[in-house]
Amino acid sequence: MAENKDRSVDQENDNLKGDAESKPTSGSEKQVDKKGAEKKSTHSKKQSTDSTAESAKLKQTIVSLKQKLDQMEDRYLRAEADMKNIQTHAKKEQADLIKYDGQQLAHDILPIVDNLQRALAVDATDDNGKQLKKGVEMVFEHLNKALADNGVVKIDALNKPFDPKFHQAIQTAAADDDHPADTVVKVLQDGYRLKDRILRPAMVIVAK
């Protein structure tokens, strides 16, 4: 009976010893867990730092690209505006060339018209002179018609109010009932215009 009790005690001691050998001490467990946690925390902080740096870099890249895009858009808008201005200017020049085509020719012809007009102002006393004057008159009329067909017309000045845009005052004369002040009394040389452009103003005498 006593022998059986001793065996039971020895078996219980063996079981306790086995349990003690199979389990690590609680201090070792805590040390391993602490190191693992620290390592995990350090790795997490590094990942967070890397993520923050990468995010900041991406934001800076986005800002830089937006600035470049704004600059390119501004340059494009300026270039487009310049192109439209050039096209508008070119169209205006072309329209003016068409509208005022023959301006230089008209300038060159006007002195001839003046000379023909002076010739017609001379009195013809004999038949030869009258025939010659009639021929000059025909040339004068044809020339004026050709000018008018091309938009060159004489400025109507006589007895009109003086207008510095159309008239050039050479002399003044006393005003009277027929010619109030600032009225054209006499035309010394006819003025001409090409459509709405003045080729030359009329030289006139103005009442004062």
Image (cartoon, rainbow, N blue to C red):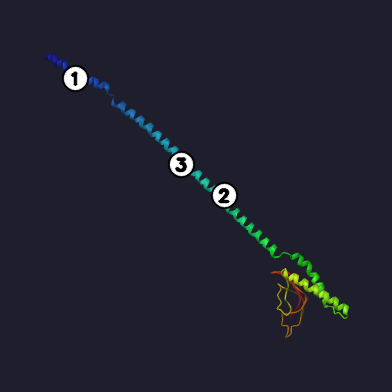
Secondary element at tag 2: helix
Q: Which residue is mark 1?
A: 12
At mark 3, the secondary structure is helix
Q: Amino acid at mark 2?
A: Met
Identify the residue position indicated by label 3 in the image. Answer: 55
Figure label count? 3
Q: Nearer the viewer, residue 27 or 168?
A: 168
142 on left or right of 70? right
Furthest toward the left, the residue is 1
C-alpha distance separating marks 3 and 2: 26 Å
Mark 3–mark 1 Cα distance, whole angstroms, equals 64 Å
Percent position of residue 124, x then y: 86, 79
User: Which amino acid does the dot numbered 1 rest on?
Assistant: Glu
Left or right of residue 190, residue 93 in this image: left
Residue 149 spot, x, y in % from top left? 72, 70
Which residue is painted at 62% across and 55% down in the image? 83
Mark before the other along the chain sequence, 3 or 1: 1
Task: Determine the secondary structure under disc 1.
Answer: helix
Q: Which quarter of the image is occupied by the C terminus?
A: bottom right
Q: Tag on residue 72?
A: 2
Quarter of the image with the N terminus is top left
Instruction: Please report contact status of discs 3 and 2: CB closer than 8 Å, yes or no.
Output: no
Going 57% across and 54% down the picture, which residue do you hit? 77
Whichever of callouts 2 and 1 sits on the residue coming sooner in the sequence is: 1
Q: Is residue 26 above or below residue 90?
A: above
Q: Residue at x 87, y 78 (%)?
A: 129
Mark 2 → mark 1, Cα distance in angstroms = 89 Å
Mark 2, residues whose alpha carbon is within 10 Å: few (<14), some, or many (≥20)? Answer: few
- Amino acid type at circle 3 is Ser
Q: Nearer the viewer, mark 3 or mark 1?
A: 3
